[in-house]
């Protein structure tokens, strides 16, 4: 538990930095050429842009905490890979999906939720697969050295 908290604290500034980077990338490639620190719907919902940006930064820090803290699941040796994967995906989903909905990062409809969830699950699976293949290759290389 202590390790998860320490790792989570490290994740707070990382989450904020990633969120900020995403606003820049979004403004450059998907926006109208103007910098948008948050989606207009959030600004309308909370009344002004400064409050919206502050709330988004705080939320991004909490997401960074959750994502980083959840990484200790991969170090639980008594758990199967399936249990680790399901638990990690569940924790990240419970952190990410409500946040994305509340901060208007997804369309507020069933289709918007399903699209966002599909993208989220696809990115999770892709990262998981890359990591799995990398670890498997490292194990093969270690076994070759032992022979």
Image (cartoon, rainbow, N blue to C red):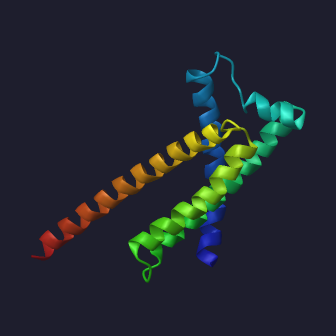
Along the line of sight, the residue nearer the viewer: 17 or 26? 26
Is 97 on the left-hand or right-hand side of 115? right
Above or below residue 83? Residue 111 is above
Residue 40 visible in the current orientation: yes
Side of 83 relative to 117 (left or right): left
Judged from this view, the residue extending furthest toward the left is 147
User: In the image, what residue occupies the spot 58% across and 22% down?
Assistant: 28
Residue drawn 63% across the image and 52% down it: 96
Q: Position of residue 39 (x, y in %)?
A: 73, 31
What's the residue at 60%, 71% (across, down)?
A: 4
37 or 93: which is nearer to us? 93
Whether residue 24 is situated above or below residue 83 in the rendered picture: above
Give me the residue at 53% from left, 71% from top: 72
Compared across the picture, whether 58 is left or right of 65 comes to right
State whether residue 86 is above or below residue 107.
Answer: below
The location of residue 52, given as percent across then percent down, is 81, 38
Q: Quadrant of residue 20?
A: top right
30, 37: nearer the viewer: 30
């Amino acid at each position: 538990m202590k390790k998860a908290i320490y790792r989570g604290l490290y994740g707070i500034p990382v989450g904020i930095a990633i969120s900020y980077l995403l606003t820049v990338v979004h403004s450059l490639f998907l926006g109208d050429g103007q910098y948008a620190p948050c989606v207009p719907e959030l600004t309308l919902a909370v009344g002004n842009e400064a409050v919206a940006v502050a709330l988004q930064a705080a939320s991004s820090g909490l997401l960074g905490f959750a994502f980083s803290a959840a990484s200790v699941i991969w170090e639980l040796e008594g758990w199967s890979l399936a249990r680790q994967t399901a638990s990690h995906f569940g924790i990240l989903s419970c952190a990410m999906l409500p946040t994305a909905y509340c901060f208007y990062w997804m369309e507020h409809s069933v289709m918007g939720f399903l699209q966002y969830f599909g993208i989220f699950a696809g990115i999770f699976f892709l990262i998981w697969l890359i990591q799995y293949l990398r670890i498997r290759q490292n194990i093969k290389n270690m076994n070759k050295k032992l022979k």
